[in-house]
Image: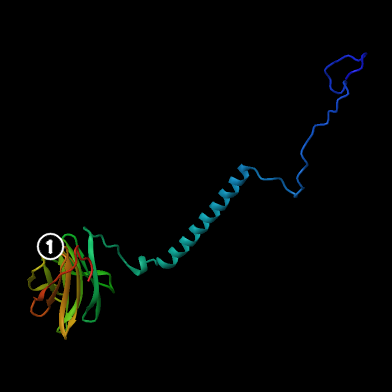
């Protein structure tokens, strides 16, 4: 309360009020200021950039190790294929490692795995896409067995790259899987497909063995 002879000037000090501002007790001095949100984002960006740079360096190092001057793992050329490859099998022709690829256009190609070049011209015979291939030997002769969307199973001589015998028929829909082996010493092929059946074929007579095996309720994609 101001004295009677004291004018009210609006100045708190003149009125005798305590002008000290109340404040919360200060935090302990940790030797550094609390980082702002912008500083935190900067640190995160810096760490992310370092990780990305490290990944790039490792990738370049692996690229240099595994990509010799001759190409990917020693390949001299990149093979440009015109259509989708549906199946691949590997084997030997007279001791030479080869691969056989089946194309969506119904053709097959044999590849030399030491020179990475095709052997001969594409083999033709299937009238639709080939979906499966397996390699075996019959009487010492390297063969391939294929199946596809034309519902046929075919046998191929990999030395002459010609079909052996007539197409084997029986499946009523596309063939999706082929495997080869022996049954009582007899070379056979086993096939499965969209007709939900499994069939066994004699690779010397080119005839089915027994009746189709049934039980699957949907398409068979592997045997």
How packed mark 1 is, by other alpha carbons closer than 10 Å (few <14, some 14-19, many 20 or more), is some
Image quadrant in which you'd find residue 140: bottom left
Check disc 1 and report its element: helix, strand or loop: loop
Q: How is the image coloured?
A: rainbow
- Residue 188, compared with residue 216, is above or below; it is below
Q: Residue at x 21, y 81 (%)?
A: 94
- Residue 117, compared with residue 141, is above or below; it is above
Image quadrant in which you'd find residue 171: bottom left
Residue 63 location, x and y as percent? Answer: 43, 63
| 53 to the left or right of 43 | left
Camera-side residue of 152 and 100 = 152
| 99 to the left or right of 9 | left
- Residue 151 seen from this side: yes
Residue ID for mark 1: 173
Residue 189 location, x and y as percent? Answer: 16, 75
Q: Quadrant of the C terminus?
A: bottom left
| 189 to the left or right of 68 | left
Q: Farthest front residue?
A: 1
Q: Residue at x 16, y 72 (%)?
A: 145
Q: Residue at x 19, y 60 (%)?
A: 104
Image quadrant in which you'd find residue 50: bottom right
- Residue 70 seen from this side: no
Camera-side residue of 161 and 88 = 88
Q: Quadrant of the N terminus?
A: top right
């Amino acid at each position: 309360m101001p004295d009677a002879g004291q004018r009210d000037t609006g100045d708190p000090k003149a009125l005798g009020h305590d002008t000290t501002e109340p404040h919360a007790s200060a935090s302990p001095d940790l030797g550094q200021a609390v980082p702002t949100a912008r500083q935190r984002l900067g640190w995160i960006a810096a760490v992310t950039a370092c990780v990305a740079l490290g990944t790039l360096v490792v990738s370049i190092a692996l690229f240099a190790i595994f990509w010799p001057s001759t190409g990917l793992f020693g390949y001299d050329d990149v093979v440009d294929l015109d259509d989708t490859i549906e199946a691949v099998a590997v084997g030997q022709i007279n001791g030479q490692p080869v691969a056989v690829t089946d194309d969506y256009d119904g053709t097959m190609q044999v590849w030399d795995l030491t020179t990475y070049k095709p052997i001969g011209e594409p083999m033709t015979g299937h009238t639709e896409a080939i979906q499966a291939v397996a390699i075996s030997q019959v009487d010492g002769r390297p063969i391939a067995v294929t199946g596809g969307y034309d519902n046929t199973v075919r046998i191929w001589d990999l030395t002459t790259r010609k079909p052996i015998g007539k197409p084997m028929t029986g499946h009523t829909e596309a063939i999706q899987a082929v495997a080869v082996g022996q049954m009582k010493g007899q070379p056979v092929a086993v096939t499965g497909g969209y007709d939900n059946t499994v069939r066994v074929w004699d690779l010397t007579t080119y005839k089915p063995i027994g009746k189709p095996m049934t039980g699957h309720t949907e398409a068979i994609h592997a045997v």
